[in-house]
Image (cartoon, rainbow, N blue to C red):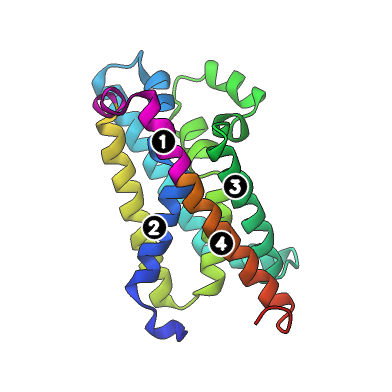
Amino acid sequence: MDHASLDVSEYIKFMIGMFALVNPVGILPVFISMTNYQPPAARNKTNLTANLSVAIILWCSLFLGDAILHLFGISINSFRIAGGILIVTIAMSMINGKLGEDKQNKQEKTETAIRDNVGVVPLALPLMAGPGAISSTIVWSTHYNTWMDYLGFSIAIAVFAFCCWLLFRAAPLLVRLLGQTGINVVTRIMGLLLMSLGIEFIVAGIKGLFPGLLT
């Protein structure tokens, strides 16, 4: 594919992959539980802080990820395979209903209990812009790396963060509407989509390392 004439569908695919990877619907109950003591104005501020932080983290990954790989001498294809394996692992956790256990360890839960502002930690990092989302962004940026691509992906990240912001604004209503069963169903569907995306990354990395292996 000619990177200079990249179709808009690739940006849409990237954004859909972000939704599947981050699974904001699955994070809704976490957001509600962490902000239930806050008045509406403070909850809205936490929502804005979290999604703005997500956008900044993903933008940094988009523009600096390739340079970081070169700094550590990591090949793009190796990182694609590693990122794909990580994404598949997260997808398996989503399908098995154990996503929260993987995204937040005991130390992070303890730190959360003593922090007043949960917008940056743990909502933005590591619950939303975690290793999987960061790895996925770097993989896309190394495959499509023209300025047009960077602009398209930057806009896609902004739209993704805005959609998450809207979703969290309606969090109380959506939790009541979907219920825990509905959230679990959405999480597992997103897990299947995410696993397919991770496998694509792995296959692309293997093709890059061993061109004659896969035809």
Disc 1 residue type?
Val
Dominant SS in magenta? helix
Looking at marks 4 and 2 on the same chain, the residue that comes earlier in the sequence is marked by 2
The residue shown at (24%, 31%) is 170
Give x and y (percent) for residue 66.
60, 67
Asked if the magenta segment contains residue 174, the reply would be yes
Q: Amino acid at mark 4?
A: Ile
Left or right of residue 200: residue 40: left
List the residue tagged with mark 2.
15
Residue highlighted by disc 3 = 131
Magenta residues span 172-189
Going by the numbered disc 3, the residue's amino acid type is Pro
Label 4 Cα neighbours within 10 Å, binned few <14 / some 14-19 / many ≥20: many
Which image quarter: residue 44? top left
Crowd tier of the residue under label 1, counting other residues whose Cα lies within 10 Å: few below 14, some 14–19, many 20 or above: some
Going by the numbered disc 2, the residue's amino acid type is Met
- Which is more toward the observer, 206 or 132? 206
Name the mark nearer the viewer: 1 or 2.
Answer: 1
- Give the residue number, with chain letter if any, for mark 1: 185
* Whole-number angstrom distance, CA of label 1 to CA of label 4: 29 Å
Give the alpha-carbon distance from disc 4 to disc 2, as whole Å: 14 Å
